[in-house]
Amino acid sequence: MSVRLAEYRHGIRAGLGFGAAAGVVGLSFGVVAQPVMGSVAPIVMSVFVFAGSAQFGATAVLAAGGDAVTAIATGAMLNARFLAMGVAAAPALRGGPLRRALEGQAVVDASWALAARGDRGFDREALLGATLPQYPAWVLGTVVGVLLGGTIGNPADFGLDAIFPAFFLALLAAELDRPLVIPVVVLAGAIALAFTPILPAGLPVLLASTTALLGLWRR
Amino acid sequence: MTAVWVTIAGLVVITAAIKAAGPVLVGGRQLPHGAVGVIGLLAPALLTALILTETFASGKDLVVDARAAGLACAAIALALRAPMLVVVLVAAVGAAAVRAIT
């Protein structure tokens, strides 16, 4: 058992840092969502959806007076990247279809980026270990955000909206020395910015992911 | 209020399905060699797009605001080899500071 625990230790250790960030972002979600959907719904959402960008996106649609179908579609588009991430993780996961489906729920941006080892495959234990601290942090952060609600004012005043991009930048920085990464970054960035004014939120990100096809050119 | 609960129910089902699709459909099969190369580049592509849209998009408009200052602070912290938590906090402080001034 201790040997098996050791396999997860690397992921859990990284996940504690991710969890601190997830807690702060979860808090800002609670603060933003509480006036839109009351006190219970944001917490239920964080417990069962557990996907930050989709939760923020859907809440923004509802806050602007959009209907449920538009809110769901927005969230689904923001989540579409998990489809590609799940395909990448698939060979490393274990067991039958049900267990694989459950392990696939652990795919969140930070854990996936930590566990995706490029040519050296995918690290299942890093994925599961890194998500373990993030889930309770995300839910707890949401609860605190809902409780604090209006008392702390606009979370943007504390720069909380700058946290996710900074977090992703730190993950990206660790990838830059691999072959072909620089051209992919340049192309993906250009596509994401070029299509933001044209396509609904979420789709520019998905479209930018096609730049990974440069990987076919190698060798 | 109904719209809120319908939205939550819909997102629960769709998110779980999206995350389960790859693992269930691909299963334990090893991916072909070309696919491995492509998948290795997915993370930098997705991360770049997420960084830029979450920093510069405001709805469908592209704007430069305090979030960009936060990102710049994060980049400096990274160049100085600061740990992850410091990078994230520096970004928040930078964005908050610029927002307080402007």
Image (cartoon, coloured by chain):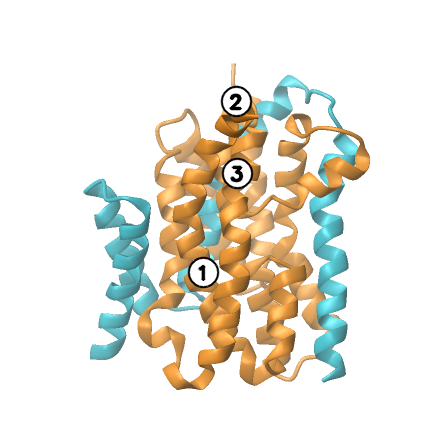
Chain colours: A orange, B cyan
In the image, A125 versus A65, the foreground residue is A125
Q: Of marks 3 and 1, which one's residue comes earlier in the chain?
A: 1
Q: Position of residue A47 (x, y in %)?
A: 63, 62
Q: Residue at x 35, y 28 (%)?
A: A177
Q: Quadrant of the C terminus of chain B?
A: bottom left
**Is disc 3 in contact with disc 1, using a CB cutoff of under 8 Å?**
no
In the image, B13 versus A16, the foreground residue is A16
Q: Chain of mark 3?
A: A
Q: Nearer the viewer, mark 3 or mark 2?
A: 2
Query: Vertically, is A8 above or below B97?
Result: above
Q: Position of residue B23 (x, y in %)?
A: 72, 35
Q: Residues within 10 Å of mark 2 (few under 14, many from 20)?
A: few
Query: Vertically, is A12 above or below A39?
Result: above
Q: Position of residue A89 (x, y in %)?
A: 63, 33
Residue located beneath label 2 in the image: A3
Is B40 on the left or on the right of B84, as rendered? right
Q: Of marks 3 and 2, which one's residue comes earlier in the chain?
A: 2
Q: Nearer the viewer, mark 2 or mark 1?
A: 2
Residue located beneath label 3 in the image: A129
**Is disc 2 in contact with disc 1, using a CB cutoff of under 8 Å?**
no
Q: Position of residue A139 (x, y in %)?
A: 55, 62
Residue located beneath label 1 in the image: A23
Say which element carries label 2.
helix
Cα separation, mark 3 vs mark 2, equals 14 Å
Q: Residue at x 61, y 57 (%)?
A: A50
* Outermost residue toward the top in this view: A219
Dot 3 and dot 2 within a common chain:
yes
